[in-house]
Image (cartoon, coloured by chain):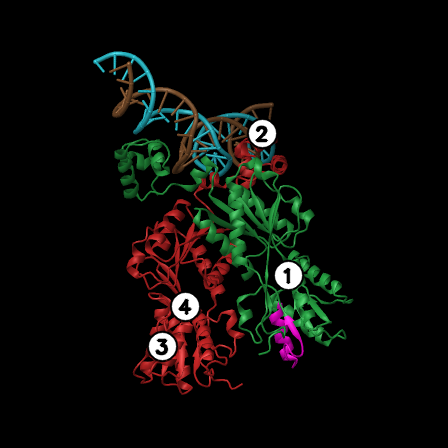
Chain colours: A red, B green, C cyan, D brown
DNA sequence: CAATTTTATGTAAACGCTTACATTTAATAT
DNA sequence: ATATTAAATGTAAGCGTTTACATAAAATTG
């Protein structure tokens, strides 16, 4: 690979001038500029990024730490981030971790070493306390996704899980259901917890005493099993609210396998509105989560932090709550086909 | 951020020794090692990646150039790559481009500047000729995905589109269909072209003269429109083979909207086996593409190239063809519910 | 125990760039 | 034409590492 020295030699100027030309900084006569550009082209020169970063400390890169690069759910967010980031000449680098404290720390160290300009951290299963122990470099702007409210100087973007789950539960109650079951997502998951809280509150506000619950972990399979168990149970729910669509889909399959009709015999609703939800029979009633937009918003927020005064963003805790919409389809029984 | 100099001072040794400790290269007494490690911990030191790269030329990073970071299709491949790459301590950096020559070149230059250790390039709409004009740094190992066969020194991984499409068409013919339509994917797309070629060949081998065709661009919407048009046409097909599942799903919706029963009135099949395909009614007959595994394979191949002798991989053209399986469900009419 | 070999550590150059500062050249004013 | 100011270019240090080479310390040998 050609270096800036090669270019300088070929163009008959100093490296400083070449640098000025390629970065469009400082004054340089058009004639010299031309010579330099010609040399750049001839040598197919591209500045060494590491050398630039070493010098300027500006990586034009934002790091992303995700619980697991495996889920479509996260990918939609990542897509949103990429789409926005590219417009601003930034790049992303993904350091995935499995939502365990130690792995997260490793990812942090890794990304700090790369001196990223900013960080997006999604760690839905981390508690407030754990979040505090992360080796955060406090000069690096960070935006958290789906975390509990944290005190000082952190910015986070979260879904309005509570209110949406509340609404969905109300919706089921209005349809006449009294025995509504909830299938939990992964233990400790913040989104799942808030959805559960909204469900509980609605039950309470409507004078329904006992909740019916089953464990799950966001997978279709866990939804299938949870539903099986729920149907057999003596609590005999007439509706099931799964903490996400994958589990709801599993639940629908399970109900079908047990010869129950959805929604006539049992209503089933989900959360997320993944692409399959509209195609399954019956079409799934759920809550639309604008993941792609969420990614863009996260990114916009981060870029703003990066550009703003460091002192400014240090003590500006910000919590952005994204409102969600109910999507009423068939699986809740509201629409008669 | 603490530097290696700070660590050296605190530990009372030279930077060289610190470097030896953190990289586990060269001999160092256990006592000194301990001191250094303690200092590293105390200062929460993490080596500056740019400085390391500048020195060693080893980025432990592989660059990925994708036509568009937007499709789930690509994401599955990316996931596969990430999963494999992480095991080997590598990271990835994504430079997306929209499959246009100029943008691709930019992405190449960008990644070359980052001096990546290897490159994965997916450019399904590029022709052989265009591929040749890319500013490839010939010391950087590259693996291409879904490209036409290229001559010298390139390695590529492709799907067995031709044979699978051939089989699928045979399958429809065996079910008694004579007027089988094909919905094309995006123009110039290599996968689509090969699928089309397989379809044509099968038609020919079975003595069916005229093909029936409609244009599409891989989106559900385009499949919907193509199907509409096909149904109205005087060629009156009894089966539709869409170049991917998204279009097939659009086609099924379209048929339903026109009061045609699938598969009784018209059989519809796809290609890819995306997750929705098994849930749609009727469940879609399609061809399973193991994207995730493909990603892993691509990555494995690339890592092997990176580690092998440069001279060796320069003239070793390799073309890996991934076999695909038919997934017979309901939409083709083979299974009576 | 001195001589030799082996092991551990230090010194300093180099990687490819940016940029403060110095110097030269051109433009403008007197 | 000369003095003054502004624009263009060059010089060289420094960013944080790694590593070849030099040196010092420890271990081994006869």
Label 2 to label 3, Cα distance in Å?
71 Å
Q: Nearer the viewer, mark 2 or mark 4?
A: 4
State the extent of the magenta-drawn residues as a range.
B247-268
Gap between marks 4 and 3, in whole Å? 17 Å
Name the residue nearer the viewer: D6 or B132: B132
Q: Chain of mark 2?
A: A
Residue under numbered circle 1: B164
Residue B261 part of the magenta-drawn span: yes
Q: Position of residue B132 (x, y in %)?
A: 66, 44
Mark 2 vs mark 3: give the one in front: 3
Report if the CB atoms under discs 4 and 1 are less than 8 Å apart. Answer: no
Task: Determine the chain carrying the residue at label 4.
Answer: A
Residue B187 in the image: state x and y as whole percent: 68, 59
Camera-nearest residue between A169 and A186: A186
Cα–Cα gap, marks 2 and 1: 56 Å
Q: Chain of mark 3?
A: A
User: In the shown orientation, is residue B274 left or right of residue B237?
Assistant: left
Above or below: residue A160 compared with residue B193: below
> Badge 3 is on which residue?
A199
Look at mark 2 in the image and give the residue it sits on. Answer: A9
Tell me what residue is drawn at x 61 percent, y 66 percent. Answer: B219
Q: Which residue is mark 4?
A: A218
Q: Nearer the viewer, mark 4 or mark 3?
A: 4
Disc 4 and disc 3 on one polypeptide chain: yes
Q: Is residue B115 visible?
A: no
Crowd class of label 1 (few under 14; some 14 to 19; many from 20; radius 10 Å): many
Mark 1 or mark 3: which is in front?
A: 1
Give the mark nearer the N terminus: 2 vs 3: 2
* Whether label 1 touches label 3, CB < 8 Å: no
């Amino acid at each position: 690979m050609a270096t800036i020295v090669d270019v300088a030699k070929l163009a008959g100027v100093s490296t400083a001038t070449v640098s000025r030309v390629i970065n469009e900084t400082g004054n340089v006569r058009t004639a010299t500029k031309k010579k330099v550009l010609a040399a750049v082209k001839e040598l197919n020169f591209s500045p060494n990024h590491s050398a630039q970063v070493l010098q300027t400390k500006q990586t034009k890169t934002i790091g992303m730490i995700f619980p697991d690069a495996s889920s479509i759910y996260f990918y939609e967010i990542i897509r949103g981030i990429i789409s926005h980031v590219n417009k601003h000449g930034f790049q992303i680098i993904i350091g995935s971790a499995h939502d365990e404290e130690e792995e997260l720390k490793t990812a942090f160290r890794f990304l700090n070493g790369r001196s990223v300009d900013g960080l997006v951290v999604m760690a839905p299963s981390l508690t407030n306390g754990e979040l505090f122990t992360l080796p955060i470099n406090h000069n690096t702007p960070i935006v958290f996704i789906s975390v509990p409210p944290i005190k000082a100087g952190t910015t986070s973007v979260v879904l309005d899980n509570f209110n949406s789950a509340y609404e969905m539960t109300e919706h089921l109650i209005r349809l006449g259901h009294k025995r509504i079951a909830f299938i939990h997502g992964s233990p400790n998951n913040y989104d799942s917890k808030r959805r559960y809280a909204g469900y509980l509150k609605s039950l309470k506000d409507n004078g329904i005493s006992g909740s019916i619950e089953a464990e799950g972990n966001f997978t279709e399979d866990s939804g299938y099993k949870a539903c099986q168990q729920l149907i057999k149970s003596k609590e005999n729910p007439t509706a099931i609210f799964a903490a996400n669509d994958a589990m709801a889909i599993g639940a629908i399959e399970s109900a079908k396998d047990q010869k129950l009709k959805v929604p006539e015999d049992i209503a089933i609703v989900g959360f997320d509105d993944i692409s399959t939800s509209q195609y399954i029979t019956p079409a799934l009633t759920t809550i639309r989560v604008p993941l792609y937009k969420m990614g863009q918003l996260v990114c916009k927020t981060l870029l703003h932090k990066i550009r703003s005064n460091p002192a400014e963003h240090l003590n500006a805790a910000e919590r952005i709550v994204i409102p969600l919409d109910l999507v009423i389809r068939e699986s809740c029984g509201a629409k008669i086909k």
